[in-house]
Structure formats: structure tokens, C-alpha cells
Image (cartoon, rainbow, N blue to C red):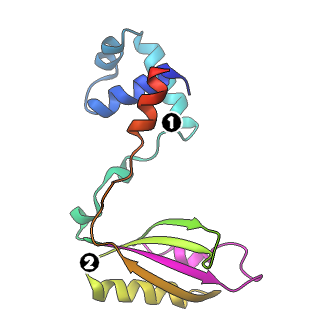
């Protein structure tokens, strides 16, 4: 990714409903250049699916929690597939330290969270879980600041 790619991403971020022609004009580049670079970034996975921008609260999932998951070792080198089948599991990271996975889940309320964590604990290979409820989001996921640094380069 170079500074023009970064400027393209910032332009889309500023005005996601604008046409390719309008955004290319704003940046002073050809429409085809804009479109080709955007398609390349999408193809290479630099731009994720639109649904990642959706606020889970809009879907009735106002509670956010982080579940540390310990797996049976060495039988479980990878997370059990059952965790991928739980719609409320919105992120999962392999981690170092006491737990093997850090799983971000969204739920309607604490009773719903209890149901979700029960499904996680019931997955084959899961030995133990520890759940922490988020009280509020102090800093939402962000990439803009990183893109701005690259755009200025």
C-alpha cells in the first residue's frame, strides 16, 4: 500500500456514498486508476466486508464480553470449529499466556451471555473459560490514524 492507496481509503471513509468518479475527481486522479486500485485492495483483502462496520447494538446485542478460552493441549492446536458456528462470536484471537484464545462475543444481556459462554465451554477441547464484561468502549476499532500516516508519507 502506498500513499495514493491510503488517500483513496481516506476519501472513501470521508464519503462512502460518493461515486468512483466523484472520489477520483476529488483526488485528482483518473477514474480507472481509482477503480483499479480499489479492486486490487479488495482482492488482496486490505478492505474487509461492509458488515464489519455494523454496530451489534443495532442488532439487539448491546452487551460485549471477552472470553479467555483454555484448550486441551496438545490435542487442540486450533480452535474447535464449533466456536466458529456461534453467531455471537464476532472475533477470535490465538493468544500467549494463561489462555489459548481470546474471544469477543456480543449478547443481548447477561442471561444471553450465559447461554453463549455455555456453548463455548461445551465445545470439544475447551477446558476452561474466563469471561470479562465490557462496561463501555473507550476506543472503538480504528484504522484511520494509521492510514493518515501513510497518506502523508
Q: Is residue 50 left or right of residue 128?
A: left
What residue is rendered at 29% in x and 23% in y?
19
- Circle 2 — which element? loop
What residue is rendered at 28% in x and 17% in y?
22
What residue is rendered at 53% in x and 91% in y?
122
Density class for disc 1 (Cα within 10 Å; few <14, some 14-19, many ≥20) is: few
Give above or below for 79 relative to 37.
Answer: below
Give above or below for 67 relative to 148.
Answer: below
Quadrant housing residue 144: top left
* Residue wearing tag 2: 108
Relative image position of residue 115 (x, y in whole percent): 38, 88
Relative image position of residue 4 (x, y in whole percent): 47, 19
Residues 18 and 76: in front is: 76
Q: Which residues are magenta?
A: 64-88
* Residue wearing tag 1: 42
What residue is rendered at 41% in x and 10% in y?
29
**Residue 27 can be seen, yes or no:** yes
Relative image position of residue 148 (x, y in whole percent): 41, 29
Quadrant housing residue 58: bottom left
- Circle 1 — which element? helix
Say which label, 2 or 1, has the lower sequence index.
1
The reply to whether the magenta stretch includes residue 79 is: yes
Density class for disc 2 (Cα within 10 Å; few <14, some 14-19, many ≥20) is: some
Q: Quadrant of the N terminus?
A: top right
Relative image position of residue 151 (x, y in whole percent): 45, 24
Q: Nearer the viewer's eye, disc 2 or disc 1?
A: 2
**Residue 84 can be seen, yes or no:** no
Amino acid at each position: 500500500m502506498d500513499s495514493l492507496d491510503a488517500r483513496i481509503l481516506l476519501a472513501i471513509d470521508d464519503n462512502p456514498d460518493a461515486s468512483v468518479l466523484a472520489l477520483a475527481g476529488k483526488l485528482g486522479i483518473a477514474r480507472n486508476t481509482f477503480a483499479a486500485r480499489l479492486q486490487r485492495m479488495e482482492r488482496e483483502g486490505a478492505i474487509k466486508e461492509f458488515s464489519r462496520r455494523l454496530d451489534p447494538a443495532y442488532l439487539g446485542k448491546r452487551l460485549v464480553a471477552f472470553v479467555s478460552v483454555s484448550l486441551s493441549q496438545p490435542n487442540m492446536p486450533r480452535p474447535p470449529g464449533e466456536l466458529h458456528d456461534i453467531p455471537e462470536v464476532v472475533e477470535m484471537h490465538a493468544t500467549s499466556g494463561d489462555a489459548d484464545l481470546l474471544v469477543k462475543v456480543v449478547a443481548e444481556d447477561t442471561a444471553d451471555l450465559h447461554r453463549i459462554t455455555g456453548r463455548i465451554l461445551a465445545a470439544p477441547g475447551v477446558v476452561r473459560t474466563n469471561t470479562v464484561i465490557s462496561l463501555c468502549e473507550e476506543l472503538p476499532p480504528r484504522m484511520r490514524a494509521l492510514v493518515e500516516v501513510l497518506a502523508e508519507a
